[in-house]
Image (spheres, helix red, strand yellow):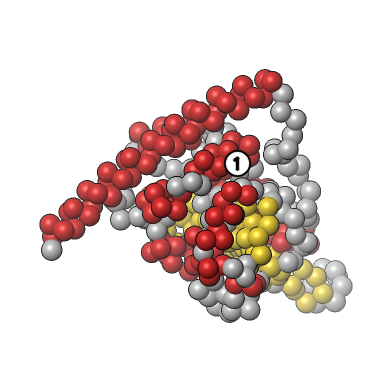
Amino acid sequence: MRLIQHKREAYWFYRFLSLGYDRWINPLFWTPAMRTVALTPARLDDRALRVVDVGAGTGFTTEGIVEHVDAANVTMLDQSPHQLARSHRRPGLAACRRVEGDAEDLPFPDASFDRYVSAGSIEYWPDPARAIAEAHRVLRPGGIALVAGPLRPRHRVGRLLADTWMLFPEDEQYRAWFAAAGFVEVSAAYAAPEWHRGGPASYGIAIAGMREQAVFGRANGAGATGATGAGATGAGERGATPVAEHFDAPFTGREKLRFAGRFVAGSAAGAAFVPIAAALTARERLARRRRR
């Protein structure tokens, strides 16, 4: 796993990043235009939908959700209380429910939501397959899960920094995780900031899949009704596989040293992306002005 692809490291990484996240960091990598593109496959087409935003952070993605869904029907989940606390600065999210929790062990009953959204969180999941199986579990039949995240950079230097910092999956990995969890009708959209010149399909993906509808009168004699997908196969049952990491696990002396090394080196690799993105953003804006 990458250096910040751990729960404790990610917690402290965002403890400090939250101080300037909305003003300085997020606008470089995750813009309103990208958010609009990314949320489209989630089919947020009814204001009464019950939606969970996993890894909601300061609420940037949640603001896009509440443009289509009543805020009172939206639950924001994050393991960082510092990020969630800053989400209160967004007036439009006042009615949203906020929950501290683990994406790999969601604190919700089966079939609790109509939509599951997670944007910019998969990078820190030690076990993405389990987290996506949890998305399947908490959705009602016919519900849709959407996960938006980065794609592995194609440039050699970008790959080196990414592989040091956190998880940047390949397109095929996202699709494999959704298939393994039992999702059907999988589709994807791609988005990138203005400074990225490699095309959206080389920057970020928003992949969505549906939890299969209940099937009536199945030919296999399962009874009058039955649900296909994880509800029938057991693939999405809570606790089907053990959680890879626990944030509150014992913190021994050796673990503290390992944590310190991973945190410092991983944070440095992540920090290197910021001036690169800032410089490329400035270059793109200057070029746009010259074209006018």
Examine the image and state in which quarter residue 56 appears: bottom right
- Depicted 193 relative to depicted 246: above or below: below
* Quadrant that contains the N terminus: top right
Type of residue at label 1? Tyr
Examine the image and state in which quarter residue 270 appears: top left
At 37% from the left and 51% from the top, the residue drawn is 28
Q: Position of residue 284 (x, y in %)?
A: 23, 52
- Give the SS element for disc 1: helix
Residues packed near mark 1 inside 10 Å, few (<14), some (14 to 19) or many (20 plus) = many
The residue lying toward the viewer, choosing from 45 and 182, is 45
At 74% from the left and 72% from the top, the residue drawn is 214
Horizontal arrangement in the rendering, residue 287 relative to residue 46 (left or right): left
Is any part of residue 108 visible from this angle?
A: yes
* Quadrant that contains the C terminus: bottom left
Name the residue tied to disc 1: 11
The residue lying toward the viewer, choosing from 92 and 144, is 92
At 75% from the left and 59% from the top, the residue drawn is 108
The residue lying toward the viewer, choosing from 153 and 292, is 292
Q: Position of residue 120 (x, y in %)?
A: 51, 51
Examine the image and state in which quarter residue 227 appears: bottom right
